Image (cartoon, rainbow, N blue to C red):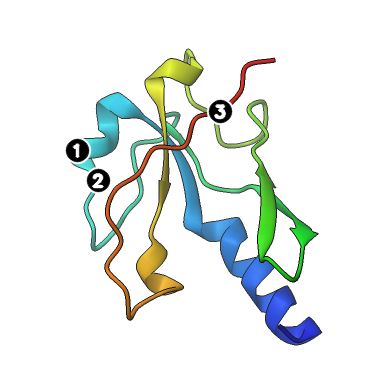
Amino acid sequence: MSKHQLDLFENNLKYELLLVDKEYIGGIDPENPVPPKNHSIRMNKVKTIDKKTAHFQSTFDLNGEEKIMNFKLENTILQFDFSRFIPAKELQPFTVDLPKG
């Protein structure tokens, strides 16, 4: 990836990952995918870990402007639309396990 492509990819990742309260996941309109206020966090900081393997790290500010009321990790879903980045492949759902601590 060129420096320009990497910068573009990182910028897009900042807006494509979404933490959402799992009680609201079914109510998100695909045409306007914004959950109710205080039930999601969209903005995150993206850091490149390894350019060669396209390994990135996203960090969400749980105390920032966007919040999830009564946040609990076990009640939160990480949502990401891979089709914007890999439109030629259909991916099966998978789970991301987050380490505690």
Crowding at dot 1, Cα within 10 Å, few <14 / some 14-19 / many 20+, comes out as few
- How far is the residue under mark 3 from the one under mark 2? 24 Å
Residue topped by disc 3? 98
Q: Are marks 2 and 1 in contact (CB under 8 Å)?
A: yes
Residue topped by disc 1? 26
Asked if 56 appears above or below 73 in the picture, the reply is: below
What residue sits 61% from the left and 23% below the top?
A: 99
Percent x, y of residue 69:
47, 19
- How far is the residue under mark 2 from the one under mark 1? 6 Å
Percent x, y of residue 25:
27, 36
Instruction: Give the number of the disc on residue 86.
Output: none
Report how many numbered discs are placed on residues in the image: 3
The quarter in which the N terminus is drawn is bottom right
Q: Nearer the viewer, mark 3 or mark 1?
A: 3
The quarter in which the C terminus is drawn is top right
Q: Are marks 3 and 1 in contact (CB under 8 Å)?
A: no
Q: In front: 97, or 28?
A: 97
Percent x, y of residue 80:
42, 53
Q: Are marks 3 and 2 in contact (CB under 8 Å)?
A: no
Q: Secondary structure at mark 3?
A: loop
Percent x, y of residue 24:
27, 31
